Image (cartoon, coloured by chain):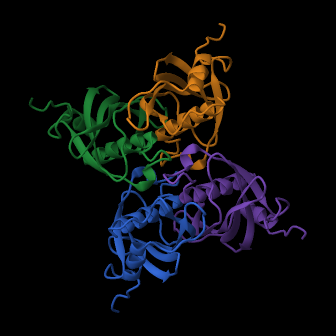
Chain colours: A orange, B green, C purple, D blue
């Protein structure tokens, strides 16, 4: 069952576009990565501190998506993000794409790594990103 | 090391577009799913038999992508597909996105399931898809 | 100066996505057509009658876009649509893409033609589309 | 009738992707701008001199597209570009999107302006862009 949107979850609506559909009349599966990217950026923007600088920037190291139920335009969908694992340079961000009733369209996780933009080597998470990730580690009361 | 393009691998070039890049000047990670989709469709088209009909069509049930090295336009990239596991209604399609020298940009797998378009239930793989998938199960000589 | 959003104008917000930007860090000009398409569809949805049926559907016959000022994510943008000319099978839909202060990013027009889906010939506008287009012909007071 | 691909025309194939189609099973009209962008960039790359620098870059000032006949995947399409008018800071680039038999899918023009990246004011065309544009002014023999 879908974890409630509460402490420990960043939740944002993703306004769909008709153009998100493909020739099969469903939202194309590549758009799910776009929706997750958009939610991550909106989450990072809530931090109030830079998450990308002259020196470091996040890259997506891996992504896992389990497509549970197609999305058909028009629909109201939300991305929910939470921290599955917090490392020195990386964070495993769990995700769920849900409808307004909590019905699950997709779940999975994305590993985001911060890299030094000059050396392309992993670099410690920005302080704000670390703090924000810690908040999303908190488990909501059962 | 990258498996050679040979028996057991379907390989297709993906001509990049400048618009595949995002504001970080790399090919956006959502495009990798588009490239895999394009390669699957080109592979299905080699079958010589319908892979989507009035009655059944494939859906992507899950996708795993390990992003190894960014792609910067312009570049010559190829998708290689092979069969990791063949089921009754589904096939696990392994993938590699490589450059002309075999350097690995991405690997992982996609689970494609054929569903009955009326009932939305899994339905046996079309005969042509099954045969094509069996060919990509063959292991190249070491 | 931008015509006020009032009688005679359909106005809708277009929530931007980070992915709308290209490698020049501006919203890519091809997305403007996507924004206009989205606004048209949202407008058509307000009609309360079918605008696409088994028998007829709109196609875009031509588009003119004058790009006045780039859009940089994040930004709040709106599409405004109005009727420039109403024909038997077609409507010339004027557009403006503006920011929250009415600052103009783009203007121009799109010619939408309804065609018979069987013959591919022009067919009279659906009654609801005609009525909706007539409403957007009304000129706001100067 | 379509001008032959010859002196005075830059012609490039645009490999279609299945994902270029929208829910109406045609290549979406916004993709035409992507195809034109791709052709411009490939043309600029033939110049052998920088067309974007630290100091200046092109922007699209306007675009006109006349959609003549839909494109359905799979198809072989080409963009043809030629110079309609050459100014100090801008060039009006005529375009045709055609199939392998010269059948016309779209024509129109795009105005590209080079701007100073610091002041955002128009700046003279790079020498290479000017020379390349002059070549595409040459009229093919009737």
As drawn, which residue projects farthest toward the right?
A: C141
Query: As drawn, is A118 to the left or to the right of A41?
Result: left
Query: Can you give x and y, in whole percent of width and height, for residue C97 in the image?
Result: 69, 59
Query: As drawn, is D116 to the left or to the right of D5?
Result: right
In the depicted structure, whether residue D104 falls above or below residue A25: below
Whether residue C52 is visible: no
Residue at the image point whose x is 41% and y is 40% from the top: B33
As drawn, which residue projects farthest toward the top?
A: A142
Q: Nearer the viewer, residue A97 or A52?
A: A52
Residue at the image point whose x is 45% and y is 61% from the top: D53
Query: Can you give x and y, in whole percent of width and height, for residue D61 in the image?
Result: 58, 69
Query: As drawn, is A85 to the left or to the right of B66?
Result: right
Query: Can you give x and y, in whole percent of width and height, for residue D49 in the image?
Result: 35, 67
The quarter in which the N terminus of chain B is drawn is: top left
Query: Can you give x and y, in whole percent of width and height, for residue D39 in the image?
Result: 40, 66
As drawn, which residue projects farthest toward the left?
A: B141
In the depicted structure, whether residue A134 falls above or below residue B127: above
Whether residue B58 is visible: yes
As drawn, which residue projects farthest toward the bottom?
A: D142
Residue C34 placement: quadrant: bottom right
Residue at the image point whose x is 78% and y is 65% from the top: C2
Q: Nearer the viewer, residue D29 or C57?
A: D29
The quarter in which the C terminus of chain B is drawn is: top left
């Amino acid at each position: 069952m879908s974890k409630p949107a509460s402490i420990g979850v960043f939740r944002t609506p993703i306004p769909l576009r008709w153009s998100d559909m493909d020739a099969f009349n469903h939202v194309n599966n590549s758009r799910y990565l776009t929706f997750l990217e958009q939610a991550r950026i909106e989450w990072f923007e809530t931090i109030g501190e830079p998450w990308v600088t002259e020196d470091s920037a996040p890259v997506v190291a891996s992504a896992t998506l389990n497509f549970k139920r197609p999305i058909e335009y028009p629909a109201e969908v939300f991305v929910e993000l939470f921290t599955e694992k917090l490392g020195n340079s990386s964070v495993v961000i769990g995700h769920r794409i849900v409808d307004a009733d909590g019905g699950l369209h997709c779940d999975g996780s994305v590993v985001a790594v911060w890299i030094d933009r000059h050396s392309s080597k992993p670099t410690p998470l920005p302080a704000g990103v670390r703090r924000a990730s810690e908040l999303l580690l908190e488990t909501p009361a059962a």
